[in-house]
Amino acid sequence: MIDRNDDLFETAREVTPGGVNSPVRAYGSVGGTPRFLASAQGARVTDASANEYIDLVASWGPALLGHTHPEVVEAVQEAATRGLSFGAPTEGEVELARTIAERVRVGDLAPVEKVRLVSTGTEATMTAIRLARGATGRDLLVKFAGHYHGHSDGLLAEAGSGVATLALPGSAGVPAPIAAQTLVIPYNDRAALEAVFAEHGENIAAVIVEAAAANMGVVAPDAGFNRFIADTAHAHGALMILDEVLTGFRVHPAGFWGLQASLGEEYLPDIITFGKVVGGGMPLAALGGRAEIMDHLAPIGPVYQAGTLSGNPLSVAAGLATLRLATPAVYARVDAAAARIADALDASLTEAGVVHAVPRAGSLFGVVFAAEAPRTYAEALEQEAFRYAPFFHAMREQGVVLPPSVYEAWFLTAAHDDEALAAIEAALPAAARAAAAATRD
């Protein structure tokens, strides 16, 4: 029987670079043919050859409620009857901005007063950096090795995710003078942060950090580290940009910042970026912060940003419906499902004698083939990553699709019911044995 995935991939490579429109989708890290998905429903996806899988990718995070939630689909369909795009303000944009600001609040802490909607996470972080530079009058940016903030120039040095998967140190096409404006230091390293500010403090506009790293595997910040970033930046007149494109509204009603604040780690980032869940699976992202900073954006300030599709009405409708449905009960369900599968993953790998760790950050988790969960990008790269490909394919053969890279997080949804979770648990022992049998090429 001919596998349509093979045929589609062959055709795709004729008309698209690498056959994909985002590099990790090419299966370069795990080998084999990517699955070309035809449909999705709840916790399951179906490929072009009508094979059904339990999905642990969840569109790389947005499908918090599960795929094609009927109320989200209905909201998009209803919005489409009124128009696909206007290039003009809409009431929905105002409602979504207000909803974001109201959700990102814990007690008296409310770091988001104004919101600008954009179309992608890369656009959100790019704009946040330009805004920080415009607000401070400084040029330098500090980022952490292994943190991924989109593919804009200057942010791809030691960026994790697809860059790590493809073993690239950075990216061609970025002029050296632009790359030189970004200072890269080890994650979870307070001394390195202090040192970079001691040397360059008066020229640093901002520190950008993933709220919890999830593009070099899941690497949570050390206790107090995010607050230390905020305090250090503010002491030198710089800003803190908290990248919640992945974690925002995924791990807590107020994002990872909200999770930390609710547990007593209180700090105030200056700009927060959002994506994925905030658009409910549609192309939408956002940045928000204090009014005095956000008001540097055009049309009232000198920092220019624009986009014909910013605040697209279909994306706004999907985002509003998703956030409305993302109740505390949904987060509790996802947390419980994630804990159950993470524990089963740990148990299966232990039984198979595989050296591993299962790092977690809220409901995000993943696998690392090393004795301890990494705290830095360098430690993440030291693992026995060769074990992941056979593990991945063994899971897929049993009807469970994982992220096609060991450096990505696993995502559970509110639609993963007991049947789906039990099927994942049943698949794990064979996959663990495949990982145990793997050898380094």
Image (spheres, rainbow, N blue to C red):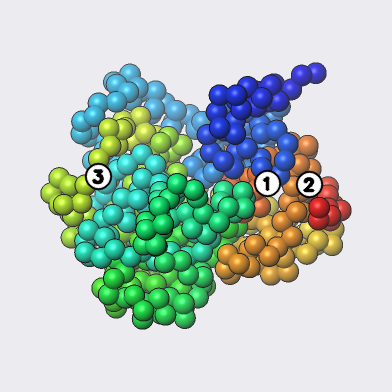
How many neighbours does mark 1 have within 10 angstroms: few (below 14), some (14-19), or many (20 or more)?
Answer: many
Find the residue positioned furthest to the left. Answer: 300
| Residue at the spot 68% in from the left edge and 46% down from the top edge | 29
Name the residue beneath numbered marker 3: 305
Q: Position of residue 420 (x, y in %)?
A: 68, 40
Given residues 342 and 199, the one toward you in this image is 199
Which residue type does callout 1 highlight?
Answer: Ser
Q: Between disc 1 and disc 2, whose residue precedes?
A: 1
How many neighbours does mark 3 have within 10 angstroms: few (below 14), some (14-19), or many (20 or more)?
Answer: some
Name the residue beneath numbered marker 2: 390
Which residue type does callout 2 highlight?
Answer: Pro
| Residue at the spot 71% in from the left edge and 25% down from the top edge | 6
Which residue type does callout 3 highlight?
Answer: Gln
Residue 202 in the figure: left or right of residue 32:
left
Q: Position of residue 100 (x, y in %)?
A: 32, 49
Residue 424, above or below 313: below
Q: Nearer the viewer, mark 1 or mark 2?
A: 1
Alpha carbons under labels 1 and 2: distance apart = 11 Å
How many neighbours does mark 2 have within 10 angstroms: few (below 14), some (14-19), or many (20 or more)?
Answer: many
Secondary element at tag 3: loop
Residue 282 in the figure: left or right of residue 110:
right
**Is any part of residue 61 visible from this angle?**
yes
Place residue 112 in its image quadrant: bottom left
Given residues 297 and 37, the one toward you in this image is 297
Find the residue positioned furthest to the right. Answer: 437
Name the residue beneath numbered marker 1: 29
Residue 438, above or below 310: below
Place residue 169 in its image quadrant: bottom right
Q: Position of residue 140 (x, y in %)?
A: 33, 65
Are the residues at dot 1 and dot 3 in contact (C-beta closer than 8 Å)?
A: no
Given residues 46 and 302, the one toward you in this image is 302
